[in-house]
Image (cartoon, grey):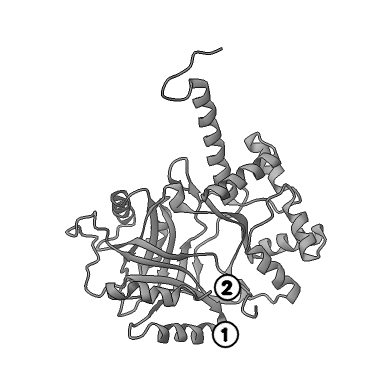
Amino acid sequence: MGTPFKGGLSPSATLIMKKQIMINNELLLTLQKGIPLEEKPFDKIADSLRLKGKDIVDRLQKMFDSGSVRRIGAIFDYRRLGYKSSLCALYVKEKDLDSIAAKLTPNSGITHCYLRGWPEELDKDLPEYPGNTGTPNLWFTFSALSENFDSELNEINKNVEPYKLLSLPACRRFKIDVIFDTRTRDRSEKFPGAVQPETKDDSVTEKVFQFSEKEKFVIQRLQGNLPLVENPFNVLAEELGWQTGELLALLNKWKESGILRRMALIVYHRNLGFKANAMCVWQVGQDNVIASGRKLAANREVTHCYQRILTEGFPYNLFAMIHSGDWECTRRMSQKISKSAELENGKVLFSIHEYKKTSPKYFFEKL
């Protein structure tokens, strides 16, 4: 019998625990990148981690139970489904923030809603401070079918009166599909075996595909969780009334055409330690915005990067999201990425409070 250790685990138990944490972190990273569209996807992933498919399912269940992950399912390109989306903002007096947010969050087209500003822990004399004279502080994303988008956004606008709503749609995407790597609190966008998407011009109309009612039902179901079993597509096919091979053929076809970006794990980044995220913004001339956006997107610290339309209410057109474990680290990160893209006079809006964060819901309008 080994000598008992006071005040903690034995060296061997500590080593085993560290090994399990390493495996879980590697599994989190792998599943965020995407799972294979085949009959037993977890078996293929398990080989590289020296596990079995059942081990992955068990570990996934524990991750859901602990609150570290949010969903494992499909991530679609909304434009190819016939949807439009926009980042929206308004300046709301502090006393009205909760009541205005309460009017926004029940809307199923609003997926993210944040109070953004400057943390009390940071000095307001810093150059990144956005000021407090009418800078938008309540931000949300809204999406709807293209033919309904304008009318539905107008209804939202009326609902938040007397406050004025700003709509800031993206006109170019430089970086999406963020992956959170818990091993380093860093981001990775290397997709083994997949071609990296080039910069997308959102002013160019993407091909909108036509879907049968049967296919729309598949899209609806894939926005939830895959069954947590070793053969999730078999169970899903039976539930949908499809043959497994038929369903997998459709999903692979959608992936090749860009409709389905990937089938993957979505994490709760705050619960994984990425608690201090911020939106960095700059005003960049039209001649330089593409080059600057590409330089920003090349930073691993940047999770999303867009060019958005300029408005009088918010005179910035280049946006980047960054995440870290604390406010000061995120602020220093903003300085680093600004320097890398040779940008000056940028502002940083920290996500102070999360009112809502959900995945988009497509083709649920008639339900």
Secondary element at image label 1: helix
Q: Amino acid at mark 1?
A: Glu
Vertical position of residue 103 compared to residue 8: above or below: below
Vertical position of residue 326 compared to residue 9: above or below: below
Vertical position of residue 85 compared to residue 279: above or below: below
- Circle 2: is it few (<14), some (14-19), or many (20+) Cα within 10 Å? many
Residue that numbered label 1 is attached to = 147
Which corner quadrant holds the C terminus?
bottom right
Residue 242 versus residue 84: which sits nearer the camera? Answer: 242
Q: Quadrant of residue 311?
A: bottom left
Q: Amino acid at mark 2?
A: Arg
Q: Residue placed at 68% from the left, 37% from the top?
A: 47
Q: Residue placed at 37% from the left, 75% from the top?
A: 99
Q: Is residue 19 visible?
A: yes
- Circle 1: is it few (<14), some (14-19), or many (20+) Cα within 10 Å? few
Which corner quadrant holds the N terminus?
top right
Q: Residue placed at 34% from the left, 54% from the top?
A: 337
Left or right of 343: which side holds 205? Answer: right
Residue that numbered label 2 is attached to = 79
Residue 287 versus residue 97: which sits nearer the camera? Answer: 97
Q: Residue 186's spot in the image, x, y percent?
A: 43, 46
Q: Is residue 188 visible?
A: no
Residue 28 versus residue 271: which sits nearer the camera? Answer: 271
Q: Residue 4's spot in the image, x, y percent?
A: 48, 16
| Closer mark to the observer between disc 2 and disc 1 | 1
Q: Residue 318's spot in the image, x, y percent?
A: 37, 67
Q: Residue placed at 76% from the left, 51% from the top?
A: 39
Secondary element at image label 2: helix
Left or right of 343: which side holds 321? Answer: right
Q: Earlier in the sequence, mark 2 or mark 1?
A: 2
Residue 93 is labelled as none
